[in-house]
Image: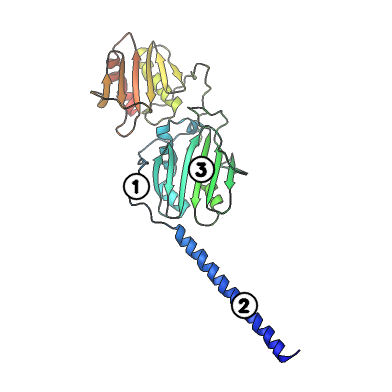
């Protein structure tokens, strides 16, 4: 082989290696730039415009995670893990807020939403998996920037009062976001479904079997537990059997106490047991907390509703 030919081949190989090295360096730099581009500063104002700050709430147990009032569900999901645990899982400073009855968590690299739902998520080509011993489906579509997970918490049909599914959606940058989504959901599920009672059976009229839980303030409890607490308080005062319902109501001797967190704002012109209240001949409404729409109403005849509310409220507010 001629010397000139050999030299040409050597030079071609050298140029090829140089080009490959340059391209690799460019792609590495682009990847590094992309990682930095996905890192963003945390919001200066928090909660966000549509968010609500966290407030102390009790943690449910057993299947009762699926029966939380909307105003409570997001609070429970956000506070199922400590601030330190959120940051350890997500790899950096985390901000939490309640938004649209769900929990919203952001870091400089991730954006996470957790929400209870009455129906399974509409996922594209999901992968079957298991989360904290429960059946789950994971949507993991390339590129690895967005993942959606659907976990079945209880084997009950969904309704306005029962949310059997936990939806998790995580977007951001970094490796293995699908595994991170599963890890977060597993810890939240484990923290909110510790050993406890099953959901009660519901009759055609909406009634549930009577139970006798330990006394507790009714704010932020699951729907059935609110009903049982109301029945316990009414029965102590009025005597006779209580009839609890799945939607936070109890009736005893023609008097009904009902909890809600979805009423139109009222003008509370009175005070009962230190709480803002509205008192009329036909209804007594009491605002349970200062920073939520949680409200307790008393209706029925045969006795003074105001006197009844004054007698019951200390137990229902403080447990």
Question: In this view, which residue lies farthest toward the top?
Answer: 302
* Residue drawn where x is 49% and y is 61% of the image: 34
- Looking at this view, is 302 or 12 the one in front? 12
Disc 2 to disc 3, how far (Cα)?
46 Å
* Image spot of residue 185 (x, y percent): 52, 44
Where residue 257 sits, quadrant-wise, is top left
Which numbered circle lies on residue 227? none
Give the labeled residue for mark 3.
Answer: 168
Figure disc tally: 3
Give the labeled residue for mark 2.
Answer: 17
In the rendered view, tell whether residue 54 sits above or below residue 317.
below
Give the labeled residue for mark 1.
Answer: 46
Where residue 53 sits, quadrant-wise, is top left
Where residue 96 sits, quadrant-wise, is top left
Q: Do the residues labelled 1 and 3 touch (CB within 8 Å)?
A: no
- Residue 237 in view in this figure: no
Question: In this view, which residue lies farthest toward the bottom?
Answer: 3
* Residue drawn where x is 70% and y is 90% of the image: 4
The mark that comes first in sequence, 2 or 3, is 2
Q: Residues within 10 Å of mark 1 (few under 14, many from 20)?
A: some
* Image spot of residue 116 (x, y percent): 49, 36
Question: Which secondary structure, mark 3?
Answer: strand
Question: Which secondary structure, mark 2?
Answer: helix
Question: Which secondary structure, mark 1?
Answer: loop
- Left or right of 229: which side holds 28? right
* Residue drawn where x is 42% and y is 49% of the image: 106
Q: Do the residues labelled 2 and 3 touch (CB within 8 Å)?
A: no
User: Of circles 2 and 3, which is in front?
Assistant: 2
* Image spot of residue 45 (x, y percent): 33, 49
Q: Residues within 10 Å of mark 3 (few under 14, many from 20)?
A: many
């Amino acid at each position: 082989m001629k010397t000139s030919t050999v030299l040409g081949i050597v030079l071609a190989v050298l140029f090829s290696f140089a080009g490959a090295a340059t391209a690799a360096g460019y792609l590495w730099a682009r990847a590094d730039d992309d990682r930095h581009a996905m890192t963003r500063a945390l919001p200066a104002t928090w909660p966000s415009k549509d968010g609500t700050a966290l407030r102390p709430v009790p943690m449910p147990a057993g299947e009762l995670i699926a029966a939380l009032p909307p105003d409570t569900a997001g609070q429970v999901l956000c506070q199922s893990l400590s601030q330190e645990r959120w940051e350890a899982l997500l790899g950096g400073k985390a901000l939490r807020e309640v938004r649209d009855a769900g929990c919203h968590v952001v870091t400089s690299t991730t954006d996470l939403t957790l929400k209870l739902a009455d129906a399974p998520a509409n996922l594209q080509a999901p992968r079957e998996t298991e989360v904290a011993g429960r059946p789950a489906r994971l949507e993991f579509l390339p590129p690895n920037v967005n993942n959606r997970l659907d976990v079945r918490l209880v084997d009950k049909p969904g309704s306005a009062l029962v949310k059997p599914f936990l939806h998790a959606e995580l977007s951001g940058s970094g490796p293995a976001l699908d595994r991170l989504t599963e890890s977060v959901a597993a810890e939240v599920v484990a923290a909110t479904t510790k050993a406890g009672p099953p959901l009660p059976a519901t009759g055609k009229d909406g009634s549930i079997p009577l139970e006798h839980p330990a006394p507790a303030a009714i704010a932020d409890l699951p729907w059935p537990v609110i009903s049982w607490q109301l029945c316990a308080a009414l029965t102590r005062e009025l005597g006779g059997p209580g009839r609890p319902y799945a939607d936070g109501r109890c009736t005893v001797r023609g008097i009904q106490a009902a909890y809600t967190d979805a009423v139109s704002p009222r003008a509370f012109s009175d005070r009962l047991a230190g709480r803002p209240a509205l008192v009329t001949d036909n209804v007594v409404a009491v605002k349970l907390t200062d920073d939520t729409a949680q409200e307790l109403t008393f209706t029925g005849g045969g006795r003074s509703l105001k006197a009844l509310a004054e007698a019951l409220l200390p137990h229902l507010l403080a447990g």
